[in-house]
Amino acid sequence: MTDPTSQVHDWNAAAEQWNEQFLEALEQNMEAQAQFVESWSETVGEAAEENEVSEGVEGYARAYETWMDASQQMVERMNDQLEGEDVDIEEFRDIWLNTANDAFKDVMSTTAFAKMTGETVGDVLEAQQQADEAAETTLRTLGFATESDVVEVGDRLVELERRQHAVEQKLDRVLEHLEDQDEQ
């Protein structure tokens, strides 16, 4: 027979673990929502055209609604567990993962997000080009070969190989002609 004290202790330990995981998930959700709102606010703030702002706000509203639906699902599943239903802890994780995917789809499908992404990619490419130019200038100043120097040497080698091959073909034809003349 199972000791009732042991069962109570096991139940308390399981409930405590579940509570800790739930609070941790809730805290992560709140942090994710805060980051999402902050990021989205910056994007909407940068959108210049009224249409983009309106669409951006609608995308944010859809994403917010998605997060609120997930919160409601979490509360419902938590109540189900408290009422004795066997709820797998992975179900809670899946709710948040699916919600994150849906919320990002809501945001990423807007013109404001596309504009912000395009501007960011443009900025990154410009910064990368400036860094490459600075690195090449530094390497050249220090007397090291740069990427463009190596590319130029490679191009010259390819051209030399092409010319060498052409000379070899001509030489082969001349030798064949001389052999043909010797045979006659």
Image (cartoon, rainbow, N blue to C red):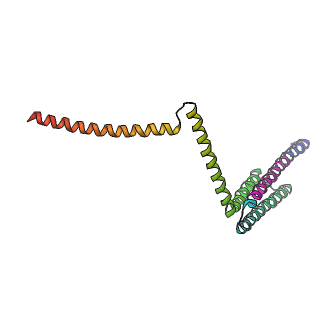
Q: Quadrant of residue 65?
A: bottom right
In percent of width and height, residue 128 lies at 61, 45
Q: Looking at the figure, which quarter contains the N terminus?
A: top right
In percent of width and height, residue 13 lies at 86, 43
Q: Nearer the viewer, residue 86 or 115?
A: 115
Q: Quadrant of residue 69?
A: bottom right
Q: Is residue 21 in the magenta section?
A: yes
Q: Quadrant of residue 171?
A: top left
Tell me if I can see residue 102 in this picture. yes
Above or below 58: residue 20 = above
**Left or right relative to 31: residue 174:** left
Q: Nearer the viewer, residue 83 or 62?
A: 62
**Extreme residue toward the left, this view:** 184
Above or below 110: residue 157 = above
Q: Nearer the viewer, residue 128 or 14?
A: 128
Q: Looking at the figure, which quarter contains the C terminus?
A: top left
Q: Residue at x 76, y 57 (%)?
A: 42
Span shown in magenta: 17-42
In percent of width and height, residue 114 lies at 66, 60
**Left or right relative to 96: residue 141:** left
Q: Nearer the viewer, residue 5 or 72?
A: 72
Q: Main secondary structure of the magenta part?
A: helix
Q: Is residue 118 in the magenta section?
A: no
Q: Residue at x 78, y 57 (%)?
A: 37
